[in-house]
Amino acid sequence: MELSIIIVSYKSLDWVVKCLAALTGDSAGLETEMLVIDNDSRDGAAEALAARFPRVRVQVNLENLGFARAVNQGIAATRGEFVLLMNPDCEVRPGATAALVEFLRAHPKTAIAAPRVLDPDGSVQYSARSFPDHLTFLFNRYSLITWLFPGNRWSRRYLLSDWDHTSVRDVDWVSGACMLVRRAAIVQVGPMDEAFFMFNEDVDWCRRMRLAGWGVTYVPAAEVVHWVGASRKRVAPRVIVERHRGMIHYFHKHHPANPLVSLLAGGLVMVRAGLMLAVNALRPR
């Protein structure tokens, strides 16, 4: 088996259908298996997908296990030489799947290859970035400082926004929204850290791959449209909380520090979470 495609879905049936439709055509010519892990959506996804995509397997969890645990379920249940992780709100452009597979075949020391990720309007999402540090939460893509002062050097350093994103580049980490991973690297390094419910598990995985001597590479010949952020409507509060809990776990794991410094950094992260929860509550449903 050449390629295992894993999609983790939570109440995203319409997006999954669109995602699978694009993947089905784009992966033609590759020996492929497709698996959707449904995290207790209770939206009839298994039945609907079986009718529309009979070759796609669907595994339904009886509770929402989070992204990392669901991905690990998918890895354990598949056998492809390469594993393509896709968010349901991603849509591959023609040739993207083959471009990523061909890159990993040509570069045996690379563990993860990731595409050029685009917003629906065609603008580049900053999906390949530098490793975060204790202050990155102030300068990430969604931070107030980045929004008010997008040209500041700290945001540019973290987001790699000075780079034109049209050339192949080895990077620190890439977004888990879409990444192709070599199974041999997973066997060596291990699966995703299930202490992350959602968010930051991709940063951690890439860091562990890099520490083990593997490469993580951005491959712009492959393009994917990611519909995240297309809506400014309210999100579930748990999404915001888990994003920030993931930040804290990542820093404790990879940047051990004086307990007082760690406590202060964690407190600042949760203050940010509180502010985002307040802003989120004002958005339309």
Image (cartoon, rainbow, N blue to C red):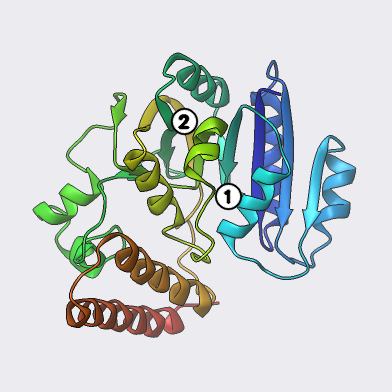
Q: Which mark is residue 89?
A: 1
Q: Is 5 drawn above or below residue 141 in the view shown?
A: above
Give how far apart the Cα atoms at labels 2 and 1 are: 14 Å
Rendering coords of residue 176 (x, y %): 48, 47
The answer to whether residue 127 is seen in the rendering is no
Rendering coords of residue 136 (x, y %): 22, 62
Residue at the spot 52% in from the left edge and 77% down from the top edge:
238
Q: Viewer-proximal residue, 149 or 243?
A: 243
Q: Is residue 136 left or right of residue 173?
A: left
The answer to which of marks 2 and 1 sits earlier in the sequence is 1
Q: Is 197 drawn above or below residue 27 in the view shown?
A: below
Question: In the structure shown, which secondary structural element does the residue marked by tag 1 occupy?
Answer: loop
Question: In the structure shown, which secondary structural element does the residue marked by tag 2 occupy?
Answer: strand
Q: Is residue 9 left or right of residue 46?
A: left
Rendering coords of residue 39 (x, y %): 70, 63
Residue at the spot 45% in from the left edge and 66% down from the top edge:
232
Residue at the spot 18% in from the left edge and 83% down from the top edge:
260
Q: Is 209 drawn above or below residue 148 in the view shown?
A: above
How many other residues sit within 10 Å of disc 2, few (<14), some (14-19) or many (≥20)?
A: many
Q: Which mark is residue 141?
A: none
The kind of residue tagged 1 is Asp
Q: Is 173 drawn above or below residue 196 in the view shown?
A: above
Judging by the rendered image, the residue that carries numbered circle 2 is 223
Residue at the spot 29% in from the left edge and 83% down from the top edge:
271
The answer to whether residue 101 is seen in the rendering is yes
How many other residues sit within 10 Å of disc 1, few (<14), some (14-19) or many (≥20)?
A: many
